[in-house]
Image (cartoon, rainbow, N blue to C red):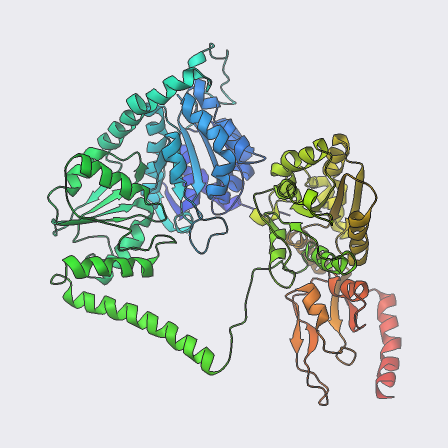
Amino acid sequence: MEVSFHEEIKLLQLGKGEEFHGEGILAITKALLQSGVSYIGGYQGAPVSHLLDVMVQAKEYLSTLGVHVEACSNEASAAAMLGASIHYPMRGAVTWKSIVGTNVAADALSNLSSAGVVGGVLIVVGEDYGEGASVIQERTHAYAMKSSMILVDPRPNLAQMVNMVEHAFALSECSNMPAMMELRIRACHVKGMFEAKNNIAPTISSNHLLNEPASFNYEKLAHPPVTFIHEKLKYQSRIPAAQKYITEHNLNELFDGELHNFGIIVQGGLYNTLIRVLNQFDLADVYGNTKIPIYVLNVVYPLVPNQIEKFCSNKDAVIIIEEGQPEYIEQEICLALRRLNINTPIHGKDIFQNAGEYNADVMIRGLITFVNKYLVNECHDALVGASQLIKNFDDRKKLIASKLIEDSVALPPRPPGFCIGCPERPVFSAIKLSQRTVGDIHISADIGCHSFGTFPPFSTGHTILGYGMSLASRAGVSPNMQRRVLSIMGDGGFWHNGLLTGVQSALFNGDDAVLLIFKNGYTSATGTQDILSTPSIFEKNDATDKLQSLVHTNQSIENTLQGLGVQWLKSVNTYEVDRVRKTLIEAFTSSYNGLKVIIAEGECQLERQRRIKPWLTSMLKAGKRVMKVKYGVDADVCNGDHACIRLSGCPTLTLKENPDPLKLDPVASVIEGCVGCGLCGENAHAATLCPSFFRTEIIQNPTLAEKLLNFLRTPLIRLLQTA
């Protein structure tokens, strides 16, 4: 079973005049089809993975339009797809997550931007920024500037977002520049509606094939010496063409207000938060009617100097609200005004914090400085209220902090962790146990679900340098370390980047290294999307009846490694903790001097539960026998040292009061939610812990023999309990 986007696909098929109701990212997906896109690709990753996931499941419908969809192996391969638009008038779109994806795609993007495009190109980037983000804190803006790509940052209103998608393609075509659209998490999930249009079947598509390839044109290659001409074209014709289109079609919006002496310039994506905050100062109402003129940059690169000049001239002060640092927009605006000899006071990062997400609290604190300096009379009453709001917020934080100190109570840490029954948790238990034998080792961690191993109770990993880069990142460590270094990556990371940057490099250089690959069958961290080593649908259905792991049915990773020349290769079941421990010790102590690969197999528990729960439900409805496995702790045997919890970290393994009044220490307990993976018992065996765990088989719709057996043994058990 996989997550179904059946209802979302229905929304993609809405026609002219029908109302679309849904999330922002799905509206963007619909807008691509309304824009006549020929091909779509990308690499999964929140907050925009919804776009690609829906498109992949909508292939049957998209084929009627002739739209080709491709789930790419990484962001670089997605960006390279856009090369189709260099020679041909085909509109193409790709998507990926934030700056980490753009970093991977950077080489292809640079060459694409150099050659330029004739068909419109749009790259939808999930700008995963701020404290809630799961990636490094950088901005896409830098890539747009350095490579001369259009950067669109639409106001979070579904109609406006859809409108900007359509304009982004046209803007790309008229300027020959690739366009990027940055969408924050809130924009992806904002709810709203817009009036749909008919989807446009592209003129060049899988339904309308090109008869002949384009004629050879050296000027379309990103290759010296023509790259020097490209550099001139960017600034002599492409950027001016983009600026002209932005002006003619009013892509940047002006919301006028009565306080003409002041102005606010804001990135489109921050507009909603700005209006909410201005409302606190009585400078705007909840419908967006503002007293201070607001210039909304739906296109943040390139800027249009004459629009900036017109907006900033003859004002007492202008404030620029730009999320993140460096302050690229503020610097560019200040430079443009200085060259035009316009001396309007400009405020930005001098009153706003430099880094971090610009939420309402941050904006209020910045704007209160501006209002205190320029608008005290106009906002006197509201200013008192805003100041009190900030004071109340700060007072609450101080009160909570003082209360915790007074009561000597510390809030318990709640780091992210593995899902219940995750097949990767047992391996980290085995890693901890193996180090008791071989000593502490340097561990190169990686991006993926297994990165949760860096949190307690495992606290395992020294570096994370890129998806699939763990084996490559140990190359400078292992030659200078007495003990062998361990590199960890998932099967998603292996196919994304690890095969070439890690395995190929280690084999070529004859490195003595240990690589542990988690083979759970999916790219789990981004939504359990299928990859090359995902079992087929037939294998999934066949395994459902047997309630067994699927991962071993696909041998693509093993065959690939053997084909490359890996000689030391061992596969282990992740839940067999002691066997995994012994295999790790063998790899660390083996006399073999070369790359040693351990493949830890265990199906992603989320996918497993999605597969078996509907099947079990259907069996129960049919009155068939169903057995579920649960684990528990015998409170009379548990010695209360809690080593099992420190070694496991499973959310369902916790503490409860000791039923023995003579014992003070709480005992371990398995709570509801246990999926019966057996890790607690395996850890107890591998680490020689107290034998307090027991396995329970819960049988529903038992057979006649089982009913008879239960009838006979129940009185015996009661007799033994009272003896």
Q: Is residue 538 above or below residue 220?
A: below
Residue 161, given in percent of the width and then of the height, sits at: 35, 41
The answer to whether residue 14 is visible is no
The answer to whether residue 514 is visible is yes
Q: Nearer the viewer, residue 479 or 292?
A: 479
Left or right side of 546 for 645:
left
Q: Nearer the viewer, residue 425 or 455?
A: 455
| Quadrant assignment for the C terminus | bottom right
Residue name at image x 58 percent, y 43 percent: 467
Left or right side of 174 for 590:
right
Residue 54, given in percent of the width and then of the height, sits at: 51, 41
Q: Is residue 78 above or below residue 403?
A: above
Count all numbered tags in the image, as a single digit.
Answer: 0
Residue 511, given in percent of the width and then of the height, sits at: 72, 38
Quadrant in the rendering for residue 20: top left
Residue name at image x 68 percent, y 46 percent: 487
Left or right side of 293 for 532:
right
Give the residue at the far bottom of this rendering: 662
Residue 346, given in percent of the width and then of the height, sits at: 20, 47
Quadrant in the rendering for residue 660: bottom right
Residue name at image x 10 percent, y 44 percent: 314
Quadrant in the rendering for residue 522: top right
